[in-house]
Image: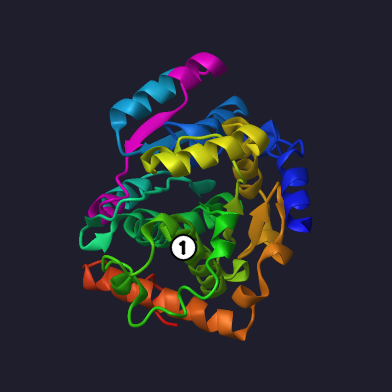
């Protein structure tokens, strides 16, 4: 019951807009999945606050262009905003995007917001689709973006942030990964391994483990780059548009009662993008660092073993598909 009360209280808390024009001015911000929902509102905020460059990274350039046109009209800033193609269902698309990212003069924050929730099993490049989009491609982009973020930190004397948008639903998946034999990504790409309706929260758990491991491999003292995972809470967005009718009906009722608007939810992303060193490797929610919300089974010795296993299996999975995880100067591919 206490958990329910806490959910109601936090969902109804008025969230602040943490970044200010002075902190955003001159910066370059990249938001994935920004043609709708949280990403759209997040990108709009950055443009409104005076960012010099905001990149909307989307699968459909046409939809991205339409979203940017709305943002420009609503903010009155017609000279800011770009649409870049990024298809997280393709590792090659991630690589192409990362190479383009390297042409920028600076990156102040990369907010990896794009995710997928499915109830039908499907494979993409030999991997279950939501695993590919939410975990493999998301983390490959994080890895590939790190050199640019580090270079930006050094050249412009700034502290860039790498933010992965996750979910508190991850904590419902206790014991699932530990019961999976062999390579996690291979096992979960076999039809019938787990209930596909539970796959979204499971991918979010994998994200949390991977972000925590990546942050441990790249401490701020070495990189001056902050890496964190943010939970935007229950928000009224189109995330579940591919889900089944019953699930959408149940979720719709919850959103009606407790859901934040996409704009309100986007404030958590904005906070995570400027949360500072204290948030490195941490779970951020409700515009606060909430590491104490991480269950003990994720933080204890057994959880750390699972974390390293997730990272190792992720690296192997990427490398078997021809995407080497090797950033000069750091053994990111070791566990």
- Which sits in the foreground, 89 or 329? 89
**How dense is the environment of label 1, judged by Cα within 10 Å: few (below 14), some, or many (20 and up)?**
many
First to last magenta residue range? 70-95
Residue placed under numbered mark 1 in the picture: 202
Residue at the spot x=40%, y=39% of the render?
245
Q: Residue at 43%, 75% (x, y): give it.
A: 310
Q: Is residue 96 left or right of residue 284?
A: left
> Is any atom of residue 78 visible in this view?
no
Would residue 60 be seen by someone viewing this image from the given angle? yes
Q: Is residue 90 magenta?
A: yes
Quadrant of the image containing the N terminus? bottom right
Question: Which is more toward the observer, 265 or 155?
Answer: 265
Tell me if residue 186 is in the magenta stretch.
no
Vertical side of 34 occupied by 176: above or below: below
Residue in front for this viewpoint, 216 or 212: 212
Please give the name of the residue rendered at 48% of the width and 68% of the height, measured from the top-left corner. 210
């Amino acid at each position: 019951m206490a958990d329910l009360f806490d959910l109601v209280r936090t969902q109804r808390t008025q969230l602040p807009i943490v970044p200010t024009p002075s902190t955003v001015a001159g910066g370059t911000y990249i938001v994935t999945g920004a043609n709708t929902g949280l990403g759209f509102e997040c990108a709009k905020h950055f443009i409104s606050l005076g960012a010099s460059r905001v990149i909307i990274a989307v699968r459909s350039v046409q939809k991205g262009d339409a979203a940017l046109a709305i943002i420009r009209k609503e903010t009155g800033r017609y000279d800011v905003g770009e649409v870049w193609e990024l298809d997280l269902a393709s590792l090659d698309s991630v690589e192409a995007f990362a190479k383009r990212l390297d042409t920028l003069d600076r990156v102040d924050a990369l907010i990896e917001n794009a995710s997928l929730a499915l109830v039908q099993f499907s494979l993409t490049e030999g991997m279950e689709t939501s695993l590919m989009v939410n975990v493999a491609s998301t983390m490959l982009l994080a890895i590939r973006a790190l050199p640019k973020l580090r270079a930006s930190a050094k050249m412009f004397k700034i502290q860039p942030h790498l933010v992965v948008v996750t979910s508190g639903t991850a904590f419902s998946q206790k014991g699932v990964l530990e019961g999976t034999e062999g390579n996690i990504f291979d096992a979960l790409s076999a039809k019938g391994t787990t209930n596909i309706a539970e796959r979204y929260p499971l991918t979010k758990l994998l994200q949390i483990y991977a972000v925590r491991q990546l942050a441990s491999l790249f401490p701020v003292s070495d990189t001056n780059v902050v890496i964190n995972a943010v939970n935007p809470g229950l928000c009224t967005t189109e995330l579940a548009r591919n889900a089944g009718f019953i699930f959408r009906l149940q979720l719709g009722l919850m959103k009606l009662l407790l859901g934040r608007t996409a704009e309100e939810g986007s404030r958590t992303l904005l906070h995570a993008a400027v949360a500072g060193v204290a948030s490195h490797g941490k779970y951020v929610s409700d515009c606060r660092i909430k590491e104490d919300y991480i269950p003990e089974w994720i933080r204890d010795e057994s959880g750390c073993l699972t974390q390293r296993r997730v990272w190792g299996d992720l690296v192997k999975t990427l490398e078997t598909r021809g995407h080497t995880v090797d950033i000069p100067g750091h053994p990111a591919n070791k566990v």
